[in-house]
Image (cartoon, rainbow, N blue to C red):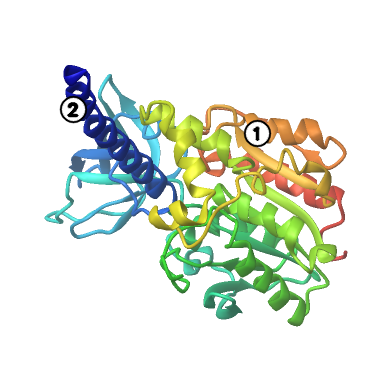
Amino acid sequence: MKRLRHAVALLVPAVLALGATLSLLVLAVARRVVTPMGRPADTRILAVDTGAQTIELQRTVDTELPGRYGLFTTGTYGYVKLGAVLSADATSVRRKLLTKIETGARVDAGAGFSGYYYASPNELHLPWESVLIGSPAGPCPAWFFPGASSTWVIQVHGRGATRVECLRAVPVLHAAGLPNLVVSYRNDGEAPRSRAGAYALGAAEWRDVDSAIAYALRHGAERVILMGWSMGGAVALQAAVSSGHRDRIAGLILESPVVDWRTVLRFQARLARVRAPLPELAMRALQQRLTARMSGADDAISFDRLDMVARATELSAPILILHSVDDGFVPIDSSRALRDARPDLVTMPEFSGARHTKIWNYDQDGWTAAITDWVTARGFSASA
């Protein structure tokens, strides 16, 4: 009996320590989900030829993609534009520079490959103005591109991104006569910060988009189309089912969208080699107010409410989904599931090879045609 008591005395602290360690790991994983991150350095600059105006990058599944892209850098230049792939081997890719790099410029090795391409609204050579949209979070900066139609497009960027992500879509929508309101939302680095400064994965951000809808309606819009990129798709979908102006939402365009966060987070956990049961426990922690706040969130997040496949019957506006089969970050499965659940609403031309939010970069003609055809077929134009 004495030996048993001694064994128990040794075991209990060990079990408690194991439980405490697991709890800390769970909260750490949950914190990563809701914490806004800076753009990662996901490739390296190996060489720059200022005579030929070419750049050699570490080869990755993104840097080898054909098309036009951007590259976040440090040194003399903060951002440069990239053109066609000129050559490649097992470890490197040589691309044409579309931004001139001068001889003697300092370009650091660490860089972030980007689909943004455009760096500011001035580069579109279209009329635009900066506006502020009052939201429950505070004044949110937005860019407004005027057009002749009474149907406005409100564009919503994704996680870890800013408004410039959306600029690629402005020209095709402008060509259809559609005014564009390109918005920011809480905790994105441009709009006001919430108490905790954390993402709510669409559960709170949709209120800022709802304020943008109200702004558009006050300034001449009769109806709106919501266009969401990646997490912006989740935000747009939440607005579509929750907004007090939902009867004025005429349609949604979703680019590489998050339709169900559970599917996305499980996929990303596998990529990051986060082992079970940590992903499930982290999502469970984010659904309880106490542990959500311990994880850095402002409040509990309901993954049931964010599951738009399960809530597909609540949708009423036509939807265009643009998603690459090999997205690599937000799997296409939930987009297909939403299409299958609501074939009466969802149009989904399939793309491949383009990766995440880079369909415009990879296949600009196909991407533009998909949007133009959908907008035209539904009468969303200057004459509508």
Residue 268 x, y percent position in the rendering: 45, 34
Which residue is painted at 17% across and 24% down in the image? 6
Which residue is painted at 53% across and 36% down in the image? 264
Q: Secondary structure at mark 1?
A: helix
Residue 267 x, y percent position in the rendering: 49, 30
Displayed quadrant of residue 48? top left
The answer to whether residue 354 is above or below residue 181 is above
Left/right placement of residue 241 relative to residue 299 reads right
Check disc 1 and report the residue beneath it: 334
Q: In this view of the protein, which residue sits in the foreground, 11 or 70?
A: 11
Which residue is painted at 25% across and 24% down in the image? 91
Q: In this view of the protein, which residue sits in the foreground, 357 or 49?
A: 357
Which residue is painted at 34% across and 45% down in the image? 28
Q: In this view of the protein, which residue sits in the foreground, 295 or 32?
A: 295
Q: Residues within 10 Å of mark 1 (few under 14, many from 20)?
A: many
Q: Earlier in the sequence, mark 1 or mark 2?
A: 2
Residue 143 x, y percent position in the rendering: 56, 72
Q: Residue furthest left?
A: 104
Check disc 2 and report the residue beneath it: 10
Give, as a three-letter code, the residue at label 2.
Leu
